[in-house]
C-alpha cells in the first residue's frame, strides 16, 4: 500500500485544527476514486508515516470511514477497504432512488435561471470529460448536476442525498469500468432528466431519475451477482414512479422552467 501512496502528492494539512477531517477527506478520495482498491489493507502505522500525522487523527478518520461503509474494521488496529456488497448496493440505491426522485419532483419547474445554466454547463463538462477519458472531471461535474436537479428538497435532505451519492461512487466506478459503451445512453438520460425538471413535469422528472439510478444498480448487480434479484431497487422505482396529481403552483419568484 505504501508504494502506491508514495507515488501520490502528499497530504497537505491546511488547518491544524481539522487534521482528522482532512485525513478522512484524503483517504476517502483515494477509496472512491479506486486508487485504494477494495480489499486493500490499511495499517495505521504505515499511514501515519506516509501522511506525516499522529495515530489519533487517523483513528478518528477510520471511524468516520467505517460509519460510511467505506472501510471494514479488523483486529490489531487494521482495516480494509470495503469490498463489493450486493446487499449494501441494493439498499443504498433503493434509498437513493426514493430521495433523489422526491428531490427531482420537488425541484421540477423551480430552478432559477442561474441553476438551469449551471446544470446545462455540468452536462457539457460531463460530455467533454467522457470524450477525454477524464473520469475525475466527469465525476465532479456529475455530482454538481445531480445536486442541482434535486436542489429544492431542503438542506438537511440534500446532505443525506450527497452522502448517499458519495457512498455510491465505488459502484459508479465499477459501472464505468465495465460499460463505457453505455455513456451516450446515460448522457441522454441526464439530458432528459434536466428537460423534465425545466419543463416542470414532476411525475416525469421523478420517474426518469428513478430509472436512471436503478440502471446503475441493476447493471452492477448483474455484473457481480447475475442471478440475484434486486427487489428493493424495483420496489423503490415503483414507489418513485407513482403518478401524483399535479395540483397547485410549483414555481416561486425568480424561478424559471426553461433555459
Image (spheres, rainbow, N blue to C red):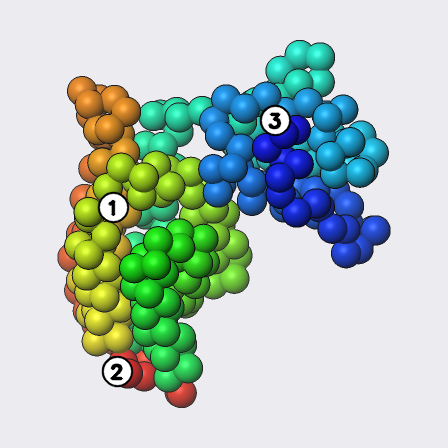
Tell me if I can see residue 233 in this picture.
no
Say left or right for 92 vs 62.
Answer: left
Dot in front, 3 or 2: 3
Compute the Cα span from label 3 to label 2.
50 Å
Q: Secondary structure at mark 3?
A: loop
Compute the Cα span from label 1 to label 3.
28 Å
The N terminus is located in which quarter? Answer: top right
Where does the image place residue 122, in percent across and percent down from the top left?
Answer: 37, 68
Q: Which mark is residue 258?
A: 2
Vertical relation: 108 (above or below) 32: below
Q: Which residue is mark 1?
A: 180
Question: Callout 2 environment at 10 Å: few (<14), some (14 to 19), or many (20+)?
Answer: some
Say left or right for 100 vs 83.
Answer: left
Question: Callout 1 environment at 10 Å: few (<14), some (14 to 19), or many (20+)?
Answer: few
Dot in front, 2 or 1: 1
Q: Which quadrant of the view contains residue 89?
A: top left
Q: Which mark is residue 1?
A: 3
Q: Nearer the viewer, residue 201 or 212?
A: 212
Residues under numbered marks 3 and 2 in contact, where contact means CB atoms less than 8 Å apart: no
**Which of the two discs, 2 and 1, labels the residue nearer the N terminus?**
1
Q: Nearer the viewer, residue 217 or 96?
A: 217
- Please report the residue visible at 54 percent of the width from the left and 24 percent of the height from the top: 40
Where does the image place residue 96, in percent across and percent down from the top left?
Answer: 36, 46
- Please report the residue visible at 19 percent of the width from the left and 48 percent of the height from the top: 182
Q: Secondary structure at mark 1?
A: helix
* Residue that lies at the very extreme toward the bottom in this rendered image: 254
Where does the image place residue 132, in percent across and percent down from the top left?
Answer: 34, 59
Vertical relation: 177 (above or below) 189: above
Tell me if I can see residue 81 in this picture.
yes
Q: Secondary structure at mark 2?
A: loop
The C terminus is located in which quarter? Answer: bottom left
Amino acid at each position: 500500500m505504501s508504494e502506491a501512496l508514495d507515488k501520490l502528492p502528499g497530504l497537505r494539512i491546511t488547518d491544524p485544527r481539522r487534521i482528522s477531517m482532512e485525513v478522512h477527506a484524503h483517504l476517502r478520495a483515494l477509496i472512491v476514486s479506486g486508487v485504494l482498491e477494495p480489499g486493500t489493507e490499511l495499517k495505521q502505522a504505515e499511514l501515519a508515516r506516509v501522511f506525516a500525522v499522529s495515530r489519533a487523527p487517523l483513528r478518528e478518520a477510520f471511524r468516520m470511514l467505517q460509519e460510511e461503509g467505506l472501510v471494514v474494521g479488523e483486529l490489531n488496529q487494521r482495516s480494509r477497504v470495503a469490498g463489493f456488497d450486493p446487499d449494501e448496493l441494493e439498499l443504498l440505491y433503493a434509498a437513493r432512488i426514493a430521495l433523489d426522485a422526491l428531490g427531482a419532483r420537488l425541484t421540477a419547474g423551480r430552478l432559477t435561471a442561474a441553476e438551469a445554466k449551471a446544470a446545462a454547463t455540468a452536462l457539457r463538462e460531463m460530455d467533454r470529460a467522457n470524450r477525454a477519458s477524464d473520469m475525475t472531471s466527469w465525476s465532479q461535474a456529475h455530482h454538481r448536476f445531480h445536486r442541482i436537479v434535486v436542489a429544492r428538497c431542503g438542506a438537511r435532505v440534500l446532505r443525506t442525498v450527497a452522502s448517499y451519492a458519495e457512498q455510491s461512487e465505488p459502484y459508479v466506478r465499477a459501472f464505468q469500468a465495465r460499460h463505457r459503451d453505455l455513456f451516450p445512453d446515460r448522457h441522454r438520460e441526464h439530458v432528459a432528466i434536466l428537460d423534465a425538471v425545466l419543463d416542470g413535469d414532476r411525475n416525469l422528472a421523478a420517474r426518469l431519475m428513478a430509472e436512471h439510478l436503478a440502471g446503475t444498480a441493476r447493471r452492477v448487480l448483474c455484473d457481480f451477482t447475475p442471478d440475484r434479484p434486486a427487489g428493493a431497487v424495483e420496489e423503490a422505482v415503483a414507489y418513485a414512479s407513482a403518478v401524483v396529481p399535479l395540483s397547485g403552483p410549483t414555481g416561486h419568484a425568480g424561478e424559471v422552467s426553461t433555459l
